[in-house]
Amino acid sequence: MGLDPVEPDWPPLATTEVRRVLSRLVPGGASATIEWRSPRPFSAAGIVRVQDAGDERRLFVKRHHRRVREMGGLEEEGCFSRHLAARGVPVPATVGSPLSDGEYLYEAQDVLAGHDLYRDALSWTPYESERHAAAAGVALARLHLASAGYEAPERAPAPLLSSAAIISSPDPLGAVARVADRRPGLADFLAARRWREEVGEALSGVQRRFLPYASALEPLWGHNDWHPSNLLWTGEGEDADVAGVIDFGLSNRTSAVYDLATAIERSVIGWLEPAEGRPVHVEQARALLSGYSSVRPLGEGEAAALPYLLPIVHVDYALSEIEYFHSVVGSKENAELAYDGYLLGHLRWFATRDGLRLCAELEKMLA
């Protein structure tokens, strides 16, 4: 939520820990070596090298606290990922099943082939080129075509999980209250805020404009966290294509338009910059849409919905992030930042001249 690096919320993976876990999964796991630790703050993860009878294997190992993910949640993510793999989407192969070890859960995957061009990029920053944005749009469309027919139900509310349930509800504030009834940590945070007035004022107008389209959008499982650093690439140059898709932690039953709006929102707007003069990469949005439409053209209702969905697509996830900061890691400062700067701040930015201009530009692109 800013340009300055922050300390991760969880202790980094330790060699003894990784060896203990991998010894239960793969030959040679007891002598594993950590090559790289992810700097991302919401979980602990890294790339691990395993030697078995002279053969080398590289694995991606990720640790989750049980208050963030339950075993069933990891199995939901894995099932969707396997569905995509069976239909030709390049995703990491899971090694065994998730493992339980004390207060943590662990998952391991084979490292996917490709160049991790955006490994050191801050989250939600733009593509290096319009060519990369177009390639990302093509890859997202292919994922949506592969996802069709996957009928698993929507996931239950949890910290750090995307959903379209609240923004698609005829009574979004009532939907927030119902989620809070199931999530005591979120309820505890909201109890100290005038959230009905604050969220209602920022959300109600644009959500009413989106609502006529909500019921017409066909439910579809999506990635829901589509940004450059969750993609691997075929090379290091501007002409690189997408070689693989990683990190299905936010995947859920939403819609193709929701996933596409998320992809735009997380890469073409300079959220980490000050609101005044915040950069907006309109041509990257155009390239991403063009690439997407070359594979999966949007239906009339989908195209009409997208500019109205874009300003509110973050709402459900922002509330889950507030719960995470407030009740899982106990950071009052970050919970308030997620509420004021993310949930409300993004809604309010889309009501500014620049935000309205971006939505108007999208309407022109989709006309």
Image: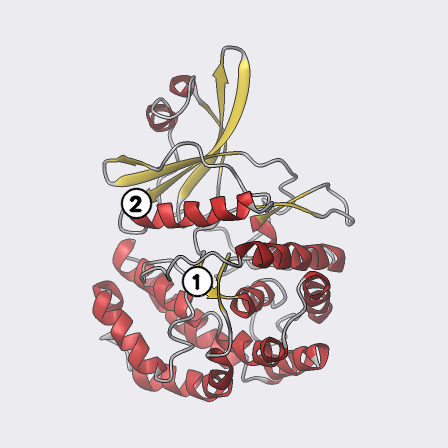
The residue under the point 38% across, 58% down is: 160
Quadrant placement of the C terminus:
bottom right
Q: Of the numbered discs in the image, which one, if any, rests on residue 362?
A: none
The residue under the point 74% across, 46% down is: 240
Distance between mark 2 and mark 1 Cα atoms = 18 Å
Residue 319 in which image quadrant: bottom left
Which of these two is toward me, 272 or 97? Answer: 97
Q: Is residue 52 left or right of residue 264?
A: left
Work out whether 225 lies above or below 278: above
Element assignment for label 2: helix
Which residue bears the numbered disc 1? 253
Report crowding for label 1: few under 14, some 14 to 19, many 20 or more residues within 10 A (C-alpha): many
Which residue bears the numbered disc 2? 71
Percent position of residue 245, x then y: 57, 47
Q: Is residue 135 left or right of residue 156?
A: right
Work out whether 150 lies above or below 235: below
Is residue 7 visible to the viewer in this orientation of the structure? no
Give the amino acid type for the residue marked by disc 2 in the picture: Met
Percent position of residue 347, x then y: 48, 78
Earlier sequence position, callout 2 versus callout 1: 2
Report crowding for label 2: few under 14, some 14 to 19, many 20 or more residues within 10 A (C-alpha): some
Percent position of residue 363, x then y: 66, 81
The residue under the point 70% across, 71% down is: 282
Q: Count of labels shown? A: 2
Give the amino acid type for the residue marked by disc 1 in the picture: Arg
